[in-house]
Amino acid sequence: MSEPQIVWLRRDLRLCDHAAFTAAAQAGPVIPVYILDDETPGERKLGGASRWWLHHALEALEKDLGRHSSKLILRRGSVCDVLPALAEETGATTVHAMRHYEPWWRRAQGKLKDKLDLQLHDGNYLMPPGSVTTGSGSPYKIFTPFKDSMFAAIHGFEVLPEPSLSAPDSWPESDTLADLDLLPTKPDWAGGMREFWHGQHGTSAAMDRFEQFLDVSKDYTDDRNLPGEDATSRMSPHLHHGEVSPRMLWDAMSPYTSDGAHTFRSELIWRDFAQNLICQFPNYAEEPYRDGYDDNFWRNPNRGHLIEEELEAWQMGRTGYPIVDAGMRQLWATGWMHNRVRMITASFLVKHLLIDWRHGEKWFWDTLVDADYGSNGTNWQWVSGTGVDSNMFVRIMAPLSQSEKFNAGEYIREWVPELADLADEDIHDPSEKRRPKDYPAKLIGHKEARERALETYRAMKD
Ligand SMILES: Cc1cc2nc3c(=O)[nH]c(=O)nc-3n(C[C@H](O)[C@H](O)[C@H](O)COP(=O)(O)OP(=O)(O)OC[C@H]3O[C@@H](n4cnc5c(N)ncnc54)[C@H](O)[C@@H]3O)c2cc1C
């Protein structure tokens, strides 16, 4: 019998369209392993909501592997120690893995290559970063030309089927899923997440949900902006944890030619764009790209600003702006927030409260089930106007008119129950008279906040 092959899994918790599984299965018996590594990512270890999702994704993958009479080996510790030790223990000659681009994974991949035969495979993105470049051969920094080049370069995908797996002569020891301690217990804050995502973990549940989305995808271009409608795919945690690949979604969508389907493909390209940015700028989620947005620009507790209290009000959904509060409470309860509302809440933190976007990015990192180093950092810098693209800081979103424009009344009623009895004309911006006693006053008025932000920007430019 040929030598065992390790498949090292990270954010690619699926069997189909998984080039590492396919290559390993062709070479010999396969030992799939997931290592919970809180050391290698440093400050970027998984947040609470991501850990909750991970538990369920691993559970679903264990079941899928069981269908192949295979197993998932679970270990804990630094991958640079655990993987070489596991290879030695099992006599595995090669470790196969999908390639990941977060800076800590790139460093670890480099180190591991010195210690063992690590074969990295592509396929977690539509195309590997760097596949399309500007006319002069440089990586893109602006989304629209990147997107156009991606559309021109993609001619469909051949999605890899689930490989048939053979088992090694003997299986190495494994931790249990419970040993990884991924679920919250004291307190158990995951009740809302269990309800919202009930029955939706793993590859086949994700693809079932995607099939339902395809039926309504023709209206996606407009309806995706309406927070009260279930009009987006909700694929983000599945894509982030790799229960599905974007190529699987692109392929499933290939018979669909509507405008909505085209817009959806563009959104998948945004995800690739974010990876391209973190490959060019590994600290993109940590440092503003543009000059001037340093500690002196933002309100700062060292200069007497009470940002802690305001930050907490934003986190807990008590800003006095119904659409902002609805979004932040949806996030806290479910680990997910509608994209339009992510933009509104992020803009509110950065421009209305003048709080450094990195505080918001960190909060999202801990509370989103789809928290993604590339996508989160890219979108926070985009909303803040501090990033590579041209979305200026001075373009200030008005949360109250956004709420009306995108018909967020029902969404607010669902997530801010104190306001549930307000009429449509009051719900977006309740007057002092109509505002229920248990709902907070606005942290700051829109006009005042706007002027303060513009003044701060002018002072920075001078
Ligand atoms: C401040 C802020 C932070 C964000 N943080 C994250 C994050 O940590 N992880 C994350 O996956 N998305 C993030 N997004 C992007 C976007 O909000 C989510 O991908 C989307 O809301 C997920 O819902 P969906 O799967 O129903 O999206 P759909 O509308 O169905 O889109 C399909 C897929 O396209 C991708 N996509 C869509 N929009 C974007 C985008 N703007 N950037 C990158 N990929 C996109 C996602 O993978 C998404 O699942 C963030 C957006 C903002 C404004």
Image (tube, rainbow, N blue to C red):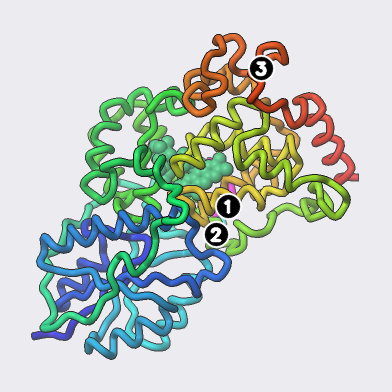
User: Residue 224: image x %, image y %?
Assistant: 44, 28
**Which stretch is magenta?**
138-147
Q: Residues within 10 Å of mark 1 (few under 14, many from 20)?
A: many
447 relative to 154 in the view: left or right: right
Q: Which residue is mark 1?
A: 377
**Residue 278, labelled with which disc?**
2
164 relative to 406 in the view: left or right: left
Q: Residue at x 11, y 83 (%)?
A: 169
Q: Residue at x 52, y 24 (%)?
A: 417
Q: Which residue is mark 3?
A: 435
Q: Nearer the viewer, mark 1 or mark 3?
A: 3
- Label 1 to label 3, Cα distance in Å? 35 Å
Q: Quadrant of the N terminus?
A: bottom left
Residue type beneath disc 1: Gly
Residue type beneath disc 2: Ile
Query: In this figure, what is the number of numbered marks?
Result: 3
Q: Disc 2, ligand 1: is the CB inside 8 Å?
A: no
User: Residue 96: image x %, image y %?
Assistant: 29, 74
